[in-house]
Image (cartoon, rainbow, N blue to C red):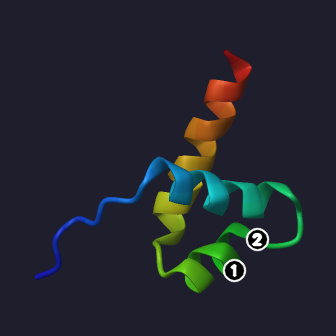
Amino acid sequence: MKGRRKYSPEFREQAVNRTLNGSFTIKEVAESLGVSYFVLRQWKAEHLKKKEI
């Protein structure tokens, strides 16, 4: 059974930025980085929420 992986804030930010620039979809970025689509979608939502504050 796999354990949870921890990703650095820098890694998360780079992944989210790749989805925000419009060149790649969340699915494409998630697959290229080996992370779950749902995890990356959550990171993006958190990132956008922080920007609103």
Viewer-side residue, 7 vs 27: 7
User: Could you tell me which residue is drawn at 31 percent across and 59 percent down?
Assistant: 6
Q: Which mark is residue 28?
A: 1
Q: Say which quadrant the C terminus sits in.
A: top right
Say which amino acid is labelled 2. Thr
- Seen in the picture, residue 5 relative to 50 is either above or below; the reply is below
Q: Is residue 17 above or below residue 34?
A: above
* Dot 2: element: loop
Identify the residue at horizontal 88%, vertical 71% (top origin): 23
Residue 42 image point, x, y percent: 52, 50
Compared with 12, 49 (above or below) is: above
Q: Is residue 31 left or right of residue 29?
A: left
Q: Position of residue 29 (x, y in %)?
A: 66, 74
Label 2 – label 1 distance at C-alpha: 5 Å
- Contact, CB < 8 Å: mark 2 with mark 1? yes
The residue at which mark 2 appears reads as: 25
